[in-house]
Image (cartoon, helix red, strand yellow):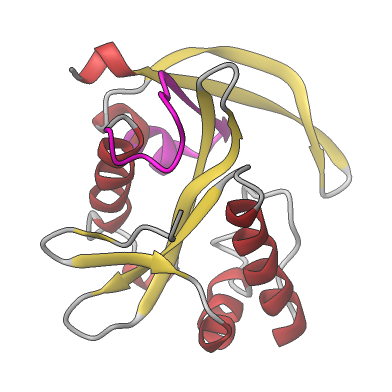
Amino acid sequence: MDFPTLSTSRLRLDKLTNDDTLALLTIFGDEKVVKYYDTDVYQSEEQAAKLIEFFNGRFAENAGIRWGIRLKESDVLVGTCGFHSVNESMKSAGIGYEIASKYWGNGYVTEALAKVIECAFSEASPFDGLYRIQADTMDGNLASEAVLKKLGFKEEGIRRGAGYWKGGFHDLKCFGLLKPDLY
C-alpha cells in the first residue's frame, strides 16, 4: 500500500522525508516538546534522520504509521502524529503526536488527529479493521489529556510505573477510543 496523504482545511498529513530532518531536529530539540517523552532533547541532525527512518520503517513493516503535520499555506512541518504500534490481530493501535511549541494552542494536533482517527476507522485505513485506539500520557501532561478528551477518548486508568525513562519510573494515564464511540 502507498503511504496515504490526508488533508484538513489547514493541514496536509504526509510521509516524512530526509528534507524534514532540520524541522524535526527543531521540534525534538525543544525541551518543552520532549518533556513528557521517553527521549532526551535531540542534539544532532543524525538523530532526526534516524527518527524519520524509524517512522518510515514502521510503515514498511505494516507495524505503524507516522505522518508529518504540515501547514497547507506555507508547507512548514510543525509536528508529527500517527500510530507507533499497530496490532492487527487485536484490531488496536497506539497513537502518538507532538507539535513544535511555537504552534501550541492553535488546535493543529486536534485537527490532525481527528483526520487520522477518521482514516483509521474507515475502509481507507492502511490497517485492517481497527476497533480500538489507545493513548498514554505521563502524569501532568494536561494539554495532551485535553486533546484526547476533546476527540472522544475515555480515561481508563493509571498504569503505575509503566514507563521508565530519563532515570525514573513514570505512571501512565491510559485513554481509549473505540470505533463505536464515534460511529
The number of callouts visible is 0
Going by the picture, which residue comes out furthest to the front?
1
| Residue at x-position 20% and y-position 76% | 72
- Side (left or right) of 149 relative to 130: left
Tell me residue 30's x, y (percent): 58, 71
| Percent of width and height locating residue 131 | 41, 18
Q: Residue at x 63, y 75 (%)?
A: 29
Q: Quadrant of residue 107?
A: bottom left
Q: At 31% from the left edge and 18% from the top edge, which residue is drawn?
A: 179
Residue in the picture at 22% in, 66% down: 11
Q: Would you say residue 6 sits in the magenta stretch?
A: no
As rendered, which of 99 and 94 lies closer to the eye?
A: 94
Indicate yes or no whether the magenta region holds residue 137.
yes
* Observer-nearest of 144 and 152: 152
Report the span colored magenta: 123-147
Residue 129: which quarter of the image? top left
Q: Position of residue 174 (x, y in %)?
A: 54, 21
